[in-house]
Image (cartoon, helix red, strand yellow):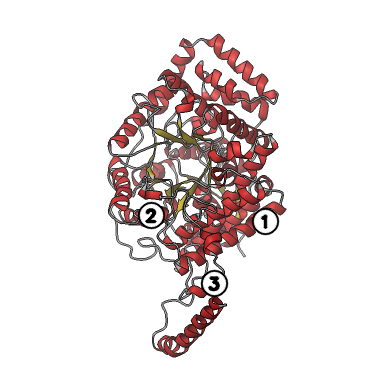
């Protein structure tokens, strides 16, 4: 049997809207993944540190405050610098359509906007995790 | 008793109807679903009759508007006297930009202001703090010092408007800045009307903009109660909020239960601090959500009013009728809006507006159709405001008081929600009150369970959301969304740099030293915060001193 996929669900930035992060964390867990949730107000440094310490294969970040263009690419850059560029990074939240190509360019594998079924995010992770 | 006989006759007639009419019909034409439930997943019967409310005592349970237990509303004439305050929550980018939006809204017929602050302001960081990077001006206006506050209210007479500020952990600081701006306009504090949210417990539960640990946070809140009772008597010192609890995924009953449990904790804290309940309780206000299940929401508002009245009377011995009266603001449900086919949200907001008005709200914010996509554009905000105006002036529901009273269904729902909320409150009492039930994660877990169940119902197709899991269309990306200028952060940084150069820095450090000393004692902190704000100490400096003395809250994470 395959080892379960290890996922870090992370809330970068100052925003406190964690309903989505918690729902997705639980859906990942119910889908058989091992899930670590960071809690609120994580800096990119903290997220990268936790991802490496916990040896995760996926980082799933959620932002609803509009700070995504600033914070998501920082996490990607730091992961690369720490030699963890193979971690699959996905994101969710209130992200305007116009910003999605910019984020994908920066290395976010997929952006899940409001209304996305959790099953869709789970399927994406299973298909794209690098192992 | 004649009543009893009457009930029996209705019961018998209902059984006859079920046997003779219904059973045959159901065989031929079954109902759409096996179980019917409300938006909050409570079972709904096919039909409600007087039998469902046979224990309802009109005088005791409903009474008259403006009288205990206020089920029918807090004023005798309700909207026949004055319509609710139409108050759109707004604020973004700089104080200059937001000031323009406020003036626009006032010109459009809005009757009160509601200030949205950006996250650094809400968490007590200046715009030049490293953690503020990328967040300045995004979800609200950036306020670093009295200078920004002066710009925000430039040309808006503070003795004429009422202003609601969504500010919690640093509520004392923003209130102090507001008082200081008023002073500069020549308006004394006793003339000021408005509300600070100032509800830290729901920040721990659901909203996340906390700073300090529970104890010092509760102290700041009771300091504000005490100060305002003396100096700012018309100010609503707290807005005990179920809104964010509901947005986090709670049911309607949980929204009432956890909000009132928080309310109980604040009242108890103030009494413990030596305040008289009838001195501060009349200035407590509440803030609820309004979701799509129209009749359940109406019942929720009525149940909340009745339950709070009973709590204030029986638990706290409040004598002043105003202490027992639950006044509340309502906002339509942000989490009900869909990113798909966003114009459909206009209709959802209209239904939610009706619920709030039929539920007797004192003020209302209607969400804009594009809020699942971005901050609302000016056009969207206007439609949202017009929705309230149409309900107010065209729908007819504002012409009589509490028009749904006596509906068998609505009264049965009102009873049910009150009962369910009371059961939760008793459970929370057993856990040692709301602060303990938050520390051990009980309240958060109850909400998360509801949120998860709701999401799974949608994904299983048990619950339909138009445009999301049914009636989808292929869509073009939305156009005309509001974008916050990314240079806002830089502009705020420059303003701060200049401020720190030009203000009287000896006065600033003296003020901050005095504040620190007061924070270490048990003195009321409001006068010290006000003095520091008047001398242009920044929000980050004031909160920084308090962080030093009080420490910071640590979130309890439960999944």
Please state which of residues A24 and A76 is positioned toward the viewer in this rendering. Answer: A24
Kindly identify which chain the residue marked by label 1 belongs to: B
Kindly identify which chain the residue marked by label 2 belongs to: B
In this rendering, the label closer to the viewer, 3 or 1: 3
| The N terminus of chain A: image quadrant | bottom right
Give the residue displayed 60% in from the left and 53% down from the top: B310
Which mark is first along the chain, 2 or 1?
A: 2
Query: Circle 1 sits in a helix, a strand or a loop, which is it?
Result: helix
Which mark is first along the chain, 1 or 3?
A: 3
Tell me the residue that label 2 is attached to: B338
Tell me how far mark 1 sits from mark 2, CA to CA. Answer: 36 Å
Q: Quick check: can you spot residue B508?
A: yes
Residue A108, percent from left and from top: 45, 45
The label on residue B426 is 1
Q: Quick check: can you spot residue A29?
A: no
Callout 2–callout 3 Cβ contact below 8 Å: no
Residue B86, percent from left and from top: 36, 43
The vertical placement of B397 against B461, above or below, is above
Q: Image quarter for residue B33?
A: bottom left
In this image, B552 relative to B52: left or right?
A: right
């Amino acid at each position: 049997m395959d080892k379960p996929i290890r996922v870090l669900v992370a809330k970068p930035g100052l925003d406190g809207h964690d309903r989505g992060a918690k729902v997705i964390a639980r859906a990942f867990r119910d889908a058989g993944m091992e899930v670590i949730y960071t809690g609120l107000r994580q800096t990119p440094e903290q997220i990268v540190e936790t991802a490496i310490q916990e040896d995760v294969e996926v980082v799933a970040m959620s932002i609803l405050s509009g700070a995504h263009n600033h914070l998501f690419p920082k996490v990607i850059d730091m992961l690369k610098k720490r030699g963890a560029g193979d971690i699959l990074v996905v994101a969710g939240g209130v992200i305007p359509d116009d910003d999605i190509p910019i984020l994908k360019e920066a290395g976010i594998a997929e952006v899940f906007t409001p209304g996305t079924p959790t099953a869709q995010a789970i399927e994406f992770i299973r298909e794209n995790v690098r192992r | 008793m004649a009543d009893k006989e009457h009930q029996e006759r209705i019961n018998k007639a209902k059984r006859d109807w079920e046997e003779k009419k219904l059973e045959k019909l159901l065989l031929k034409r079954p109902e759409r679903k096996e179980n019917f439930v409300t938006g909050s997943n409570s079972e709904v019967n096919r039909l409600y009759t007087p039998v469902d409310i046979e224990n309802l005592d009109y005088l005791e349970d409903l009474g008259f508007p403006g009288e205990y237990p206020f089920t029918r509303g807090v004023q005798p004439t309700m909207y026949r006297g004055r319509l609710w305050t139409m108050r759109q929550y707004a604020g973004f980018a700089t104080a200059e930009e937001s000031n323009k939006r406020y003036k626009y809204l006032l010109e459009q017929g809005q009757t009160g202001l509601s200030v949205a602050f950006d996250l650094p302001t809400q968490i007590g960081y200046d715009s030049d703090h490293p953690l503020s990077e990328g967040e300045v001006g995004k979800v609200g206006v950036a306020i670093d010092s009295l200078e920004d506050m002066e710009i925000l209210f430039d040309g808006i007479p503070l003795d004429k408007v009422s202003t609601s500020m969504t500010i919690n952990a640093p509520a004392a600081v923003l209130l102090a800045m507001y008082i200081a701006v008023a002073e500069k306009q020549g308006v004394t504090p006793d003339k000021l009307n408005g509300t600070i949210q100032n509800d830290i417990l729901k920040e721990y539960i659901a909203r996340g903009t906390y700073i300090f640990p529970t104890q010092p946070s509760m102290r700041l809140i009771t300091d504000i109660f005490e100060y305002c009772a003396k100096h700012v008597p018309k100010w609503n010192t707290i807005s005990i909020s179920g809104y964010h609890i509901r947005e986090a995924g709670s049911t309607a009953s949980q929204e009432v239960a956890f909000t009132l449990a928080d309310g109980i904790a604040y009242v108890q804290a103030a009494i413990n601090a030596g305040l008289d309940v009838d001195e501060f309780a009349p200035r407590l206000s509440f803030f609820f959500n309004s979701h799509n299940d129209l009749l359940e929401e109406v019942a929720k508002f009525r149940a909340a009013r009745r339950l709070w009245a009973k709590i204030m009377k029986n638990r706290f011995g409040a004598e002043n009728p105003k202490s027992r009266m639950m006044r509340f603001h309502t906002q339509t449900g942000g989490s009900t809006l869909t990113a798909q086919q966003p114009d459909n949200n206009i209709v959802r907001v209209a239904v939610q507006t009706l619920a709030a008005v039929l539920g007797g709200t004192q003020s209302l914010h209607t969400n804009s159709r594009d809020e699942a996509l971005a901050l609302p554009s000016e056009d969207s905000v206007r439609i949202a405001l017009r929705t309230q105006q149409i309900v107010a002036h065209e729908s007819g529901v504002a012409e009589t008081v509490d028009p749904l009273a006596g509906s068998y269904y609505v009264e049965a729902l009102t009873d049910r929600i009150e009962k369910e909320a009371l059961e939760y409150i008793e459970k929370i009492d057993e856990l040692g009150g709301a602060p303990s039930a938050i520390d051990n994660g009980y309240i958060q877990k109850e909400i998360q369970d509801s949120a998860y169940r709701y999401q799974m119902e949608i994904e299983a197709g048990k619950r339909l959301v138009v445009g999301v899991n049914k009636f989808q269309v292929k869509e073009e990306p939305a156009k005309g969304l509001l974008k916050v200028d990314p240079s806002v952060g830089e502009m705020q940084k420059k303003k701060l740099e200049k401020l720190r150069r030009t203000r009287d820095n000896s006065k600033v450090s003296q003020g901050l030293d005095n504040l620190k000393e007061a924070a270490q004692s048990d003195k009321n902190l409001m006068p010290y915060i006000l003095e520091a704000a008047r001398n242009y100490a920044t929000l980050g400096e004031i909160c920084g001193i308090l962080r030093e003395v009080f420490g910071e809250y640590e979130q309890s994470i439960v999944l």
